[in-house]
């Protein structure tokens, strides 16, 4: 039986950096710092109805979440793009409101993986 | 892992990474450094052109979708500069549809690599781009 889907799966970039704990930590810190700004920007843009800014923020986030293999968050981004295209403001706000907590959960999962990475 | 190219003097090839997303830029930099290339990073096409004005680079690895000047605009600017005739340009993009890739090939990119990429895919694309062009001696 398959378990619940993981919030992120940074296996691909762990391989790319040879499981180097220092490089992993650098990427996690960078993710936390830069994606946080874009998540906040996307939420603010969704609330204010600033479509162009929202598209730009979602584009940046899609790149960052793809690197860490955060598939549920990537689906949220696609759903937000869809709601934006349909001009479904209610759905867009619902998705945007849940974004910060999902982002924090992804960060926590990536932090949890720091230790096994350091023990390699 | 793919073997990397060196200059005739035995120096690693120099790659300029252009990406406005710090995660993408940093990961590409780490991967290419670990593969053995020399790497410099710029976060916009105008800054990349400024860097190319004063530095020798073998390959530009550029994102496509950047605010203001895109990777396609950067390619056009490079191709319009006779002093950069030998410079190879690789598209590093999340646009994975075949039609989009055909568009990039027609535009004149030497290779295309889809994000997120593995180190082998990234190095493979750089090495494809560094192959001698038809009629040109290997460097």
Image (cartoon, rainbow, N blue to C red):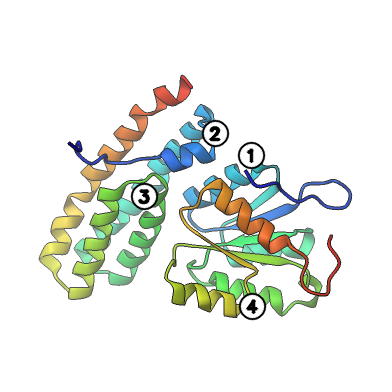
| Tag 1 subunit | B
Which numbered disc flags the more N-terminal residue, 3 or 2? Answer: 2
Q: CA distance from mark 1 to mark 4?
A: 30 Å
Q: Which residue is mark 4?
A: B76
Q: Secondary structure at mark 3?
A: helix
Q: Secondary structure at mark 2?
A: loop
User: Which residue carries the number 3 mark?
Assistant: A65
Spatial separation of the CA atoms under disc 3 and disc 2: 20 Å
Which chain does the residue under circle 3 lie in? A
> Is the residue marked by circle 3 packed among few (<14), some (14-19), or many (20+) residues within 10 Å?
many
Which mark is on residue B101? none
Quarter placement of the C terminus of chain B:
bottom right
CB under 8 Å between callouts 1 and 2?
yes
Chain letter behind tag 4:
B
Residue shown at 26%/62% (left/top)?
A78
User: Disc 1 to disc 3, how far (Cα)?
Assistant: 23 Å
Observer-side mark, 1 or 3, equals 1
- Residue B77, quarter of picture: bottom right
- Residue B29, given in percent of the width and then of the height, sits at 60, 46
Q: Nearer the viewer, mark 4 or mark 2?
A: 2
Where does label 2 land, which residue? A18
Tag 1 secondary structure: helix
Residue at mark 1 to residue at mark 2: CA–CA distance:
9 Å
- Foreground pick, B63 / B68: B63
Marks 3 and 1: in contact by CB < 8 Å?
no
Q: Dividing the picture into quarters, in which one does residue A117 lie? A: top left
């Amino acid at each position: 039986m398959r378990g619940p889907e993981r919030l992120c799966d940074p296996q691909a970039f762990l391989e790319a950096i040879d499981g180097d704990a220092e490089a992993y930590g650098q990427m996690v810190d960078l993710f936390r710092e830069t994606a946080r700004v874009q998540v906040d920007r996307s939420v603010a843009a969704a609330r204010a109805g600033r479509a162009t800014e929202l598209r730009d923020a979602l584009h940046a986030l899609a790149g960052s979440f793809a690197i860490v293999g955060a598939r549920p968050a990537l689906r949220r981004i696609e759903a937000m793009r869809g709601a934006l295209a349909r001009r479904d403001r209610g759905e867009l706000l619902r998705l945007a409101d849940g974004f910060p907590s999902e982002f924090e959960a992804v960060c926590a999962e990536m932090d949890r993986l720091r230790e096994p990475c350091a023990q390699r | 892992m793919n073997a990397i190219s060196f200059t005739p003097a035995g120096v690693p090839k120099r790659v300029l990474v252009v990406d406005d997303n710090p995660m993408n830029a940093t990961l590409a930099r780490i991967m290419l450094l670990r593969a053995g290339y020399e790497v410099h990073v710029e976060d916009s096409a105008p800054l990349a052109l400024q860097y190319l004005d004063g530095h020798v680079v073998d390959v530009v690895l550029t994102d496509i979708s950047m605010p203001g000047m895109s990777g396609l605009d950067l390619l056009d600017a490079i191709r319009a500069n006779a002093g950069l005739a030998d410079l190879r340009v690789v598209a590093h993009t999340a646009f994975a549809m075949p039609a989009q890739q055909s568009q990039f090939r027609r535009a004149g990119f030497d290779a295309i690599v889809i994000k997120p990429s593995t180190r082998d895919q990234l190095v493979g694309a750089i090495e494809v781009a560094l192959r001698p062009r038809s009629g040109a001696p290997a460097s």
